Amino acid sequence: MSAFQSLISLLSSAGVRRRQVLAAVALSTATLCSALGLTVLSGWLITRAWQMPPVLDLSVAITAVRALGISRGALRYVDRLYAHRIALRAESRLRCVLFDASRPGTSVSVRDADVQRMTDALVRSLVPFGTAAVMSAIAVAWAALLQPWAAIILLAAFVVRGVLAPMLAARSARAVEQVRDLNVVEEALGRLTRDRAEYTLAGRLGALEGEASQASRKAADSTQRALSLTAASRALGTLAQGLAIAGVAWVGLNTYADDPMWLGMLVLIPLASFEAHGGLDQAAVHLDEASRTAVRVSGALHEEPALGPAPRVLDVSAENLLCAYGERRWTLDAPFGSRIILRGPSGMGKSTLLRTLAGELPARDGRVRPSALARYHSEDEWVFATTIRENLLLAKPDATDAELEAVLDAVGLGLPLDLLLEDGAGSLSSGQRRRLLLARALISDAPILLLDEPTEHIAEEDARELLAMLQAPRLPGTLEDRTIIAVTHLEDSDVSRETSTSL
């Protein structure tokens, strides 16, 4: 199934019917037909009045101009009202469908943004493209009645302006997004600021700054090449429109040199008909984004609901996995009891990998075997404005004070259980907050823990001790044996080589 078909399938599941889209296109077309008729008829009226005929000969045209002027505004209002009504109803239904299909822990904000992007495609992409196609056919047919060669010129211009130029615009936007997703500059600057002291002592600070500068130049060059397609798209559309008007005018001059009324009508047709193509570049960009979004979320929508308790799959694996974000592919095998530490700089997609292994994000390609028993602990997990005890009991409500104190001692957090955190995370230092979140993860009964930066903001020596604890044969907390997959920024010398992987 193509990306566009995935989008259409999701919109259909949200209650959008073909007849509704066709009705919206018809209303939009009627609006632009009023504008086209108003422009052409006004031109005919001006050229005919120049010949000073009897006023009664112009009465019908004058009344028609007034009617078209009024109908244009009225139809535009009805067009917008109807199209947005369909989109808003589809957004409400699709949001409910995706929420029901989502697994616990899925980001609601991400789902809501995806829903808005896909339903906005109705108003911002599907209706404009449909309207432009119908208006192009009407303009070509009208021009063919006056002069067949003018119709051929218009048809060629419409293909360039309505098909080729939007394709270039969508391709350019996709290329810019790919450059932004690579995070090359952010990665280089992060290494420069994080490891500046070490590189200075090694005498390699200049080389590191050169790498950052080179990464910035490469990113700028890639962005400039991508944006050149946008410039080419706009130039191509403007050139097609200008050449069409000039070509039709030249044909008209050779055909209706002695009849200024029909000459004026023929020349005004391309001037008015290109109004429908004005927003097609942005429509193509949004349609491409919405289609790719539909591919990403359609898997969650079409998952078969579980008829019973989830199977106790204790192994986690990935083969040539391409996550929802980024272009890096992952291969990982973690049978039960594994201790895996993934090390690498920011922007590599380590957190996205953990969320994919937990089943929170769908995979774009490759094979992944998530486990319903895996629990993902993010770097910015919430700390509630209550006691230390209550923050830990969230993970295991029936835990005893002895168990809670033991896990706090294991992570090196010497705070009493009754200590009230009045400001939540603001009542703790960054290192204390990380230790509390790690203790919450260890007190849980999840057999698979996916830990995002468990040693962030902790002193280097203490961080090494915590990582050694996570790689020990017997773990503190509720379960002595479980799978641990953690990501960290620590260097190779800071963790055990047997259970760590450098990225």
Image (tube, grey):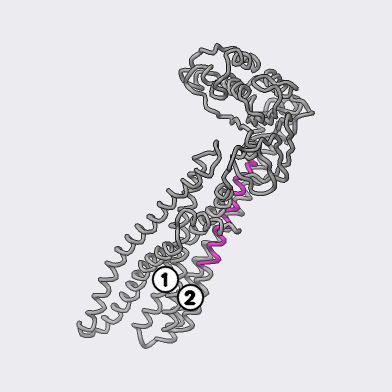
Range drawn in magenta: 161-188
Circle nearer the N terminus (2, 1)? 2
Graded by Cα atoms within 10 Å as few (under 14), some (14 to 19) or many (20 or more), the crowding at tag 1 reads: many
Closer to the camera, 85 or 502?
A: 85
Instruction: From the top left corner, tell me how far across and down residue 266 is, in percent.
Output: 40, 79
- For residue 273, which numbered disc appears in the image? 1
Mark 2 highlights which residue? 154
- For residue 28, which numbered disc appears in the image? none
Q: Is residue 453 magenta?
A: no
- Disc 2 on helix, strand or loop? helix
Instruction: From the top left corner, tell me how far across and down residue 422 is, in percent.
Output: 46, 18
Q: Is residue 62 visible?
A: yes
Q: What's under tag 1, amino acid-wise?
A: Ser
Quadrant the C terminus occupies: top right
Q: CA distance from mark 2 to mark 1?
A: 9 Å
The image shows residue 147, relative to residue 1, as above or below, that is below
Please identify the residue farthest to the front as the structure is shown: 308
Instruction: From the top left corner, tell me how far across and down residue 132 is, in percent.
Output: 45, 67
Q: Residue at x 37, y 88 (%)?
A: 258
Counting every numbered tag in the picture gives 2
Q: What's under tag 2, amino acid-wise?
A: Leu
